[in-house]
Amino acid sequence: MEQESLNAEIDRALEDYYSKNGGVGGNRPDAKLLLQDKNLIHYPILIEYKGYKDKLVKLDNEGRVANKTAKNQPDFKNINSYAVNGAVHYANALLHYTSYTDIIAIGMTGFKNESGNIEHSIGVYYVSKSNFGIGQKVDDYTDLSFLKKENFDKFIEKVKNLQLTQEEIEKLKEQREQEINASLVKLNNDIYQNEKGLGESDRVYLVAASIIATLGVPNKVAALEKSDLKSSSEDGNRDGDIILRKIKAFLNEKNLPNEKRDLIVRTLQNTLTTDNINKAENGESQLKRVFTKIVDDLGIYYKIGLTTDFTGKLFNEMYSWLGFSQDKLNDVVLTPSYVATLLVKLARVNKDSYVWDFATGSAGLLVAAMNEMLIDAKNKIKSPDELVVKSAEIKANQLLGLEILSSVYMLAILNMILMGDGSSNILNKDSLKDFNGNYGFRKTNEKFPADAFVLNPPYSAQGNGMIFVEKALSMMSKGYASIIIQNSAGTGKAVEYNKRILKHSTLLASIKMPIDLFVGKSSVQTNIYVFRVGEAHQKDDVVKFIDFSNDGYTRTNRKKASSNLRDTDRAKERYQEIVDLVRFGKGKLNILTEKEYYEGYIDPESGADWNQSAPIDTKPTLDDFKKTVSDYLAWEVSNILKNQNTEDERLGK
């Protein structure tokens, strides 16, 4: 692409961003764009000038560029006032509205000192998908000579060596997830109130179609732009036709199996090609209008490569506005990402695991599993080439999910594509009736060698969902399983299923979860059950019963809250302690107490004694006796003094 057209693309992106946000302070900021081309890698360079002293950069308490308010909204005061903050803000616009993934943001101030001489300061930051758009300082510079051709290679080498720690990544993910929640509420409210005539499934399919069409494949499939949709009535060139062609090109480039690609296209086509949604009113179709809202509100988040259950959050929001038919059964309750990670760790997932989920939903549990597997691979494999091969193997062959509802299935596909395309073996099948344990595509005659099972089942299914557990575990010969389920499954609602499960699997732990875990979605009490597969449960096998009612999080359900989940008592440490307790036992007790942790036994022939708590010792101790006597004597003395005071008052003393 010629230099002029590249600059034009960037300029259009900034104009798009300014118009969407009404401009910062009402005016377009003073920004300059340069472009460097080295080894066919383009690094847009955005320079923001401020002619004031001490206006180079404003950082927050953690040393990051302070571009967000306490409510996770853009802090336009800082963006407007500080050079680096402005440059980083508009570098994010390039991530959002162009195909660029790496931008150099430079802030510069210049002023005359008392002697009349010009003084200047420079801040150089790297903004990319890899750092979630926050911006990382590259180095200290006194001028712009690092941009010269002879110096640029060395500069880019320094940029490439910038790294975020895993702890920093987790913090940034949390911050971005809060922003995503706010954007999803806004988007869903807008579509629900203003876009009439769209059915429940239509809304899901439009979100999936819009996101897939705008992802693109570098150097192969250009991401669809809003300007590409002309709202034409010409057959074959309507907005829906254009989006559908882009989706086909994307799926072809991803090398999906033909039958899977055809299923996705067929499912989306029914919505995208309807007459009403493509009919132009005042020069714009409803499809283009919805497409624009989705890209504007969500594009920045899915384009920067968040490793989180993105569509799970989207789906939860859709439920709150729309109410899918299954939701009337209190049936579709998606697992929070931190609970999904807990389930994955309890199932001992690592880079060599083969993980499946028999009620996949939006694939949140498989996303968590894939992330854990990729992290483990990165930590253990030191050869870059070998790591690339292993990562591809994990995504293509080590994950399998089943989802029967077609609208939910589309979100699962979308989620796994967004998270790195682990969608290969997401199957639109009934796991109880139509699944034989084989791979779904390509290796259809080969068994999936599952050794890790994670599940949050629909609770209206037989045995509160334990029917899924029995089916999955009976098809495994080894490994571990962790499920979150309505706790009545362990106290009588699933007796026969539980008894059959224990004939080939051992119950390792029963964990009582907080009652408000699914606040706003459901109020059922849930437990997590952890199993070792392939060994029948013996009556002398120790079961770890853990009361995790206090998990360290405080939850609210306020529509306008910036965050409805706050870590108020070492939540992350508590979740890690649960993993350690189940794996290693009582010696790992630290934050939790012996009142919350109990090692006991179950009767393999019962199936209704899976929820137990630490026994309360009712036998009084010597200290109890002393305290009782002390309390009694204090009461006696108090009464004597009270009576004496009354007598004194009667005598007038």
Image: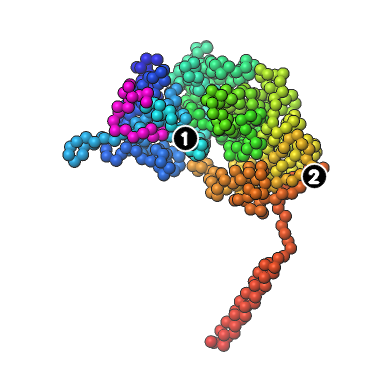
* Closer to us: 147 or 453: 147
Dot 1: few (<14), some (14–19), or many (≥20) neighbours within 10 Å?
Answer: few
Helix, strand or loop at disc 1?
loop
| Residue 204 horizontal side relative to residue 433, left or right | left
Q: Secondary structure at mark 2?
A: loop
Please report the bounds of the magenta region as a residue range. Answer: 135-154
Lateral position of residue 575 relative to residue 620, left or right: left
What percent of the width, then of the height, locates residue 555?
56, 46
Q: Is residue 140 magenta?
A: yes
> In the rendered image, which residue does mark 1 sit on?
164
**Residue picked out by circle 2:** 539
CB contact under 8 Å: marks 1 and 2: no
Q: Residue at x 41, y 29 (%)?
A: 159
When asked about the image quadrant of residue 63, the answer is top left
Q: Earlier in the sequence, mark 1 or mark 2?
A: 1
Name the image quarter holding residue 258.
Answer: top right
Tell me if 619 is positioned left or right of 137 in this view.
right
* Quarter containing the N terminus: top left
Q: CA distance from mark 1 to mark 2?
A: 48 Å
Residue at (47, 17) in percent of width and height: 219
Q: Amino acid at mark 1?
A: Leu
Toward the front, the furthest residue is 382
The three-letter code of the residue at mark 2 reads Lys
Q: Against 241, is 172 above or below?
A: below
Let me know if residue 312 is in the magenta part: no
Residue 603 lies, in percent from the top left, at 80, 45
